[in-house]
Amino acid sequence: MKWLPNTSLTGIADLDRQDIDQLMAAAGQMAGARAPAMAPLAGRIVATLFYEASTRTRLSFEAAALRLGAHVVSVADATGSSSVAKGESLADTVRIVSAYADAIVLRHPQEGAAQEAARALGDRIPVINGGDGAGEHPTQALTDAYTLHQHFGRLDGLTVTFVGDLRYGRTVHSLAALLGSYALRAVQLVAPEGLDAPGGLAGSLGTAPVIHISSLAEAAATTDVLYMTRIQHERLPAGATPPGPLRVDRAVLDALPASSVILHPLPRKDELPTLVDDDPRAIYFQQAANGVPMRMALLTHAIG
Ligand code: NCD
């Protein structure tokens, strides 16, 4: 076990395989649990401090906290509505919030922000990274892994294909790092020009062969998991022309094996048309729903 209770989770490097297995098992137990029958976090306060837009991450963390019997204090738009608008630093803000809450879930546009916040806090209360710019999104990766484990009963041996904005997509960075703890059969990368995965990504994947493929339909034909992502327009350099999306179309669906699944961290744009929603291999709404039990498991570990 690498991740100790009452310490921060800033990236996948804070976890080992045993932690990930235990969190997935705990999420499985949390699924379907309802407060107040079970209130292990009664009397605790979780702060969600979001400097960037969010629907799933913030609300599923808050729902998870409430289901565990904790209370929630929330800043959904820290840049505009907290003292950050008066120029307060991140370090000062989290230090203040640490006097009010037992854990902070932080989302911030700057890469490394969660680590900076954790450093500023010492061991006072844990910070959980809810997304730091183009860096990481470890709790989404855990939700994704849990969804795959639920479906396949294992992570070892899978072929996973990451599609879309692999450069700025933080969910890809975290999920690839997480899967590095398992023995994947292969990882396939399909990215538009200019949005290739950062150099470190292949290294985080352990021994799995990493294959770059330009045709999405070709990659789909040999994968267990098609992990689609949105082009992160907000992170492209100013003035850059965004490439067109790699889209799941009829040809891709025809090529994709019947036993495969399609994931997407959402929100989606043109890369995942709604025609895909009725396909039995589309499990991204289940994936989004799984954010609650996984975040219940995370909060219970962090402050239970
Ligand atoms: C992702 C994110 O914020 O990185 N969304 C999420 O948390 N489910 C993906 C994205 O914004 O494209």
Image: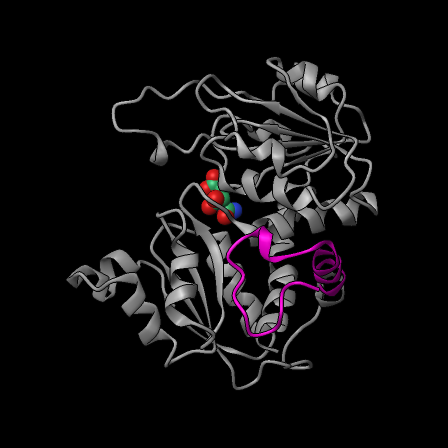
62, 11: nearer the viewer: 11
- Quadrant in which the C terminus is drawn: bottom right
Image point (66%, 63%), residue name: 2
Give residue 160's quadrant in the image.
top right
Image coords of residue 225 (percent x, y): 71, 33
Q: Would residue 32 appear left or right of 101 to someone viewing this image?
A: right
Q: Would residue 13 appear left or right of 22 to someone viewing this image?
A: left
Q: Is residue 237 magenta?
A: no
Image point (50%, 55%), residue name: 57
127, 86: nearer the viewer: 127
213, 229: nearer the viewer: 213
Total residue callouts: 0
In this rendering, the answer to whether 227 lies above or below 118 is above
Residue furthest to the bottom in view is 43
Give residue 257's quadrant in the image.
top right
Image point (61%, 73%), residue name: 5
Q: Which residues are magenta?
A: 1-26
Image coords of residue 47 (percent x, y): 42, 71
Q: Would residue 188 appear left or right of 103 to someone viewing this image?
A: right
Image point (31%, 58%), residue name: 77
